[in-house]
Image (cartoon, rainbow, N blue to C red):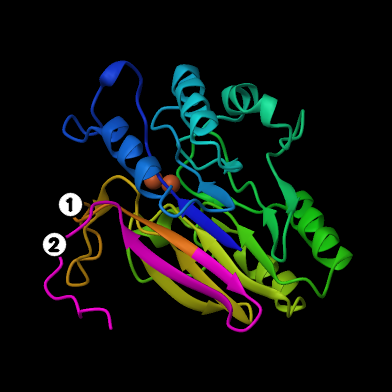
C-alpha cells in the first residue's frame, strides 16, 4: 500500500504570489504531477492548502485532485478555513457536514485517522478535550490495524520558532496515543521542513513543504526566512514484510550521476 503525502501548498487566488515571490500554484501543479509516478493508492494533504482560506483556491485544488484520479484526503492547517474547504471537497464524501474536519479512512492494510487541529485565524493549533475524546474513541475501536494519524501542527517541541505556534494540548494527546501501540506514525505539516521526533511511543514526522521551505537557523532560531530548497513530498509505503517505511522525494528530478548497467 502506497500512501503519498503533500503539505503546505499555500495556494492564493488570481495568481498572486506568497510573500510576493513564491508561485505556489506552479509548485502545486509540479507536486501533483510528480507524485503520480508511481500512482499511490491514496494521497493525504496535511493542511495549509490555501494561504488565505479563499474559496476559489479550494475549488481549483479539488478539480486538480479529481483530475489526478487518486483518492485524496484533506485536513486543515492554520491558513485554512473550514467552511470553504468543506464545500469544495464535499463531493468526496468523507468530510463531516458540520464541526471539526476529522474522520477515519478504512481502506487497505493501514488505517488513517485524520485530526483537525485548526483554531481559525490563529497560527498555533489545538487538540481540545472534544477532539481528544474523539481520537481516543477512534483508537479504542481498533488496537490491531497499523494506524497512521495525520494532523497539521507538529505535536512535539523542536527548539525553533515553530514551538510558539505548535500544538496546544499536546501532552494530553500524547497520553492518548501512547496507549495505542498500533500507531505506526503521526504525520504532520506546518514546519515546511523535514523533521522527525520519537513521540508518544511512536514516530512523529513533519513532511517538508511541497512548495517552499522555511530556512533552518539553529544559531538564531527566532529568524524566519523562506528558502528555495527543493519542494518535496513523502511516500509512506506499507508492506507486510517491512511494515511502514517513509521516504522523502524531491518534486523535481535531478541528474543521474552514475547508473550501474543491468545484467
Ligand atoms: Fe504552512
Ligand atoms: Fe501551518
Which residue is rendered at x = 45% and y = 40% of the image? 48
Nearer-N-terminus badge (1/2): 1
- In the image, the residue with mark 1 has its CB under 8 Å from the nearest atom of ligand 1: no
User: Taking 143 as reference, is 163 left or right?
Assistant: left
**Residue 251 percent location from the top left of the image:** 29, 52
Question: Looking at the image, can residue 34 be seen?
Answer: yes
Q: Which residues are magenta?
A: 236-263
Which residue is rendered at x = 53% and y = 62% of the image? 187
Q: Name the residue beneath numbered marker 1.
A: 227
Q: Of discs 1 and 2, which sits in the foreground? A: 2
Question: Looking at the image, can residue 169 be seen?
Answer: no
The residue nearer to you, when weighing 123 against 178, is 178
Disc 1 to disc 2, how far (Cα)? 22 Å
User: Taking 178 as reference, is 211 left or right?
Assistant: left
User: Quadrant location of the N terminus?
Assistant: bottom right
The residue nearer to you, when weighing 101 against 242, is 242
Q: Name the residue beneath numbered marker 2.
A: 255
Which residue is rendered at x = 38% and y = 58% of the image? 162
User: Taking 72 as reference, is 47 left or right?
Assistant: left
Residue 98's quadrant in the figure? top right
Residue 145's quadrant in the figure? bottom right
**Residue 122 percent location from the top left of the image:** 49, 39
**How many numbered discs sit on the rendered protein?**
2
Q: Is residue 240 magenta?
A: yes
The residue nearer to you, when weighing 27 against 75, is 27
Amino acid at each position: 500500500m502506497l500512501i503519498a503525502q503533500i503539505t503546505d501548498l499555500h495556494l492564493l487566488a488570481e495568481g498572486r504570489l506568497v510573500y510576493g515571490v513564491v508561485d505556489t500554484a506552479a509548485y502545486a501543479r509540479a507536486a501533483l504531477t510528480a507524485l503520480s509516478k508511481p500512482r499511490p493508492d491514496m494521497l493525504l494533504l496535511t493542511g495549509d492548502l490555501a494561504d488565505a482560506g479563499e474559496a476559489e483556491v479550494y475549488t481549483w485544488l479539488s478539480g486538480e485532485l479529481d483530475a489526478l484520479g487518486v483518492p485524496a484526503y484533506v485536513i486543515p492547517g492554520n491558513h485554512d478555513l473550514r467552511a470553504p474547504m468543506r464545500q469544495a471537497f464535499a463531493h468526496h464524501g468523507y468530510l463531516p457536514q458540520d464541526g471539526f474536519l476529522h474522520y477515519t479512512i478504512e481502506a487497505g492494510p493501514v488505517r488513517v485517522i485524520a485530526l483537525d487541529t485548526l483554531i481559525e485565524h490563529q497560527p498555533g493549533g489545538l487538540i481540545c478535550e472534544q477532539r481528544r475524546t474523539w481520537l481516543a474513541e477512534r483508537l479504542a475501536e481498533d488496537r490491531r490495524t497499523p494506524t497512521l494519524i495525520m494532523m497539521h501542527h507538529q505535536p512535539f517541541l523542536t527548539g525553533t520558532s515553530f514551538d510558539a505556534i505548535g500544538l496546544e494540548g499536546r501532552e494530553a494527546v500524547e497520553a492518548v496515543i501512547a496507549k495505542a501501540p498500533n500507531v505506526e506514525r503521526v504525520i504532520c505539516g506546518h514546519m515546511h521542513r523535514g523533521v522527525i521526533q520519537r513521540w508518544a511511543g511512536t514516530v512523529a514526522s513533519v513532511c517538508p513543504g511541497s512548495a517552499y521551505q522555511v530556512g533552518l537557523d539553529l544559531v538564531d532560531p527566532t529568524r524566519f526566512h523562506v528558502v528555495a530548497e527543493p519542494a518535496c513530498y513523502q511516500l509512506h509505503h506499507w508492506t507486510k514484510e517491512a511494515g511502514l517505511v517513509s521516504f522523502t522525494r524531491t518534486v523535481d528530478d535531478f541528474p543521474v550521476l552514475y547508473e550501474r548497467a543491468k545484467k
